[in-house]
Image: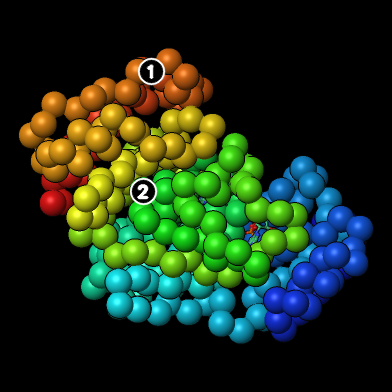
Amino acid sequence: MYQFNFHSPKNIDDAINIYNSCEDPKFLAGGMTLLASMKQRLIAPSDLIDLRAINNLSEIILNKNTIKIGALCSHYKIASNNIIASKINKMIKLASGIGDPAVRNMGTIGGSLANSDPAADWPAAILALKCNIITNNRSISSNEIFTNMFETCLDESEIITELDIEIPEFFNYVKFPNPASRYAIVGVAIAKYENKVSVAISGASHTPFIAKELSEALTLNFSNNIPLKTIPSDGLNQDIHATSEYRANLIDVLTKDALKAY
Ligand SMILES: Cc1cc2nc3c(=O)[nH]c(=O)nc-3n(C[C@H](O)[C@H](O)[C@H](O)COP(=O)(O)OP(=O)(O)OC[C@H]3O[C@@H](n4cnc5c(N)ncnc54)[C@H](O)[C@@H]3O)c2cc1C
């Protein structure tokens, strides 16, 4: 590892002031992606600004119709939380299926969203759910945050502080994991609210995306007996793990699988 400066601010304002005073800084959460990228010399930030000493970024709070999840909550913390277990139970399964125990203990939900890996699990789940991503200076709807592969609409010095999720009537996320990393070769997230169903897909494109026709069909008839609107394979990812046709088929299979829990 090469030399860099390390900062551990106690509040958001200090974190942003430090960020603005450094040459090439990066915020650090769980470090599961950031530190690996530094070790591989893919990036070489001059300064790491650790967000973990900032108070109140790791809480999970139940309000009337919503759950607030602090950005610094680890996957493990979410997987073992009683509020999540009682209100959006299948999030437990999602969080428990991420990587391995070390990744789940260190990696955070905020880091996962900021990183915007198209094969990650939280981005598709958050896209399907009615969710606002709260930062130090604004609220961003989950359908606006992911702009491209590993890109978001966050400004450089913007910090995600929490997620505000409207509790759905039904939620499930099912993935076909890469056997080595556990990242999704394809993942399907389904969130049902009173008047709207959203199906979001991970692993199949350069960003997580809403499967529009599938969402509309399930909004009209929420059942695993309806014929699914198969997504055309053109434009889906094609790599050593799976062809685009295989991924298109996985979307159908995983959608039916996810609906079985209803
Ligand atoms: C071996 C391995 C297997 C994995 N398997 C999976 C998997 O199966 N499914 C899955 O979904 N993910 C997987 N991951 C990813 C992991 O779960 C983390 O979510 C991910 O690495 C990023 O979270 P982090 O907290 O570690 O962020 P970091 O690595 O600390 O940061 C990542 C990026 O986000 C920025 N950032 C972090 N927090 C914030 C914030 N609050 N506000 C603004 N910017 C911020 C950082 O500056 C950095 O650019 C895996 C990772 C590894 C190493």
Amino acid type of the residue that numbered disc 2 sits on in the rendered structure: Ala
Amino acid type of the residue that numbered disc 1 sits on in the rendered structure: Ser
Question: Considering only vertical position in the picture, is 35 above or below 51?
Answer: above
What residue appears at the point 54 percent right and 32 percent down from the top-left corner?
A: 206
Direction from residue 107 to residue 100 in the image, left or right: left
What distance separates the C-alpha of mark 1 from that of mark 2?
Answer: 21 Å
Mark 2 or mark 1, which is nearer the start of the sequence?
2
What residue appears at the point 86 percent right and 55 percent down from the top-left corner?
A: 24
Dot 1: within a 10 Å radius of its alpha carbon, few (fewer than 14), some, or many (20 or more) residues? some
Direction from residue 16 to residue 190 in the image, left or right: left
The reply to whether the residue tagged 1 has its Cβ within 8 angstroms of ligand 1 is: no
Direction from residue 160 to residue 219 in the image, left or right: left
What residue appears at the point 46 percent right and 39 percent down from the top-left corner?
A: 208
Viewport quadrant of the N terminus: bottom right
Quarter of image, res 9: bottom right
| Residue position for label 2 | 128
- Residue 248 visible to an observer of this rendering: yes
User: Which of label 1 and label 2 is nearer to you?
Assistant: 2
